[in-house]
Image (cartoon, rainbow, N blue to C red):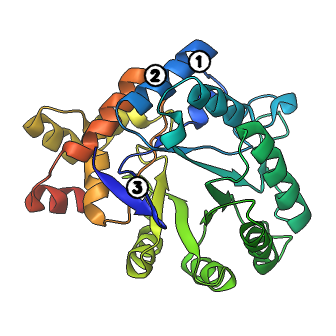
Amino acid sequence: MHTRRIGDVEVSAIGLGAMPMSIEGRPDEDRSLATIHAALDAGVTLIDTADAYHRDAGEVGHNETLIAKALASHDRGGDVLVATKGGHLRPGDGSWTLDGSPQHLKAACEASLRRLGVEAIGLYQFHRPDPRVPYADSVGAVRELLDEGKILMAGISNANPEQIKQANEILGGRLVSVQNQFSPAFRSSEPELALCDELGIAFLPWSPLGGIAKARELGSAYAPFARVAETHGVSPQRVCLAWMLAKSPVVIPIPGASRPETIRDSIAAAELTLTAEEIAELDAV
């Protein structure tokens, strides 16, 4: 398995986005555990989650609890960097709300620590800016968690270039990751990717295949990905992830999965080498 770095930690070049295992349409627990175990068996050492990845109001942290159970029941569970997030909320009615207050972020981190069963969270990320709270206050709370040893590394999500620079300054140059939406259908995070490349900060594209509902349609929606896939005898989804990896050594896609076969296919993208001509064709989509 090819590797990349988040801060000083070496991780698999493809991570697992575990959100689909906990929200609407989620599989039963046995299949979710099998999916996580399949990822570990294939060499994945990065799993992305959040306290807001749940379906019902009374099950905050469902995804974190699921991951903790999966890691505890696998002999490679201790090799995994779990990246979780705080600051986004789901009331249980399908909507999303925000709370970026320092008080909430600190309480959310403590709850995530308990659910994950660890003394310190490997990577903690501020999930999404809250317009009611100064960004510096939210990131300042993450800095305090870092200084206190509650988290080992700090990241941000859904941030623009100015927020990336501000967060890195507030964290004293210790910002290690930015998690933004990026896919063939969502290219507006190119400036953030370029900035992360310049600063040496890991860029984690979320929904890299276009999201749960549209991932299967990637090849039909974007013909060049289907053409390149046919040339290599692989899926368009695998081509998509290989294309992202080719953009910069800081890119670490975290495709969502809820079945063992899909995460295995995604992981194989790290072994797929595209030609310069193919990359240019896909860039032009």
Q: In the image, is residue 285 above or below residue 23?
A: below
Label 3 to label 1: alpha-carbon separation: 25 Å
Q: Earlier in the sequence, mark 1 or mark 2?
A: 1
Q: Determine the residue positioned at 44% across, 42% down.
A: 255
Q: Earlier in the sequence, mark 3 or mark 2?
A: 3
> Amino acid under label 1?
Pro
Placement of the N terminus among the 4 image quadrants: top left
Q: Determine the residue positioned at 49% across, 19% down.
A: 34
Disc 2 residue crowd, few under 14, some 14–19, many 20+, Cα 10 Å: some
Residue beneath label 3, please? 252
> Amino acid under label 3?
Ile
In front of the other: label 3 or label 1?
3
66 sits left or right of 190 in the view: right
Q: Determine the residue positioned at 55% across, 21% down.
A: 33
Q: In the image, is residue 170 above or below residue 179?
A: below
Element under disc 3: loop
Q: Are marks 3 and 1 in contact (CB under 8 Å)?
A: no
- Tell me, for residue 27, which label it has, or none: 1
240 sits left or right of 96 in the view: left
Q: Position of residue 146 (x, y in %)?
A: 71, 68
Q: In the image, is residue 163 above or below residue 31?
A: below
> Amino acid under label 2?
Arg
Q: Determine the residue positioned at 44% across, 74% down.
A: 196
Q: Are marks 1 and 2 in contact (CB under 8 Å)?
A: yes
Residue beneath label 2, please? 259
Label 1 to label 2: alpha-carbon separation: 8 Å
Q: In the image, is residue 35 above or below residue 19?
A: above
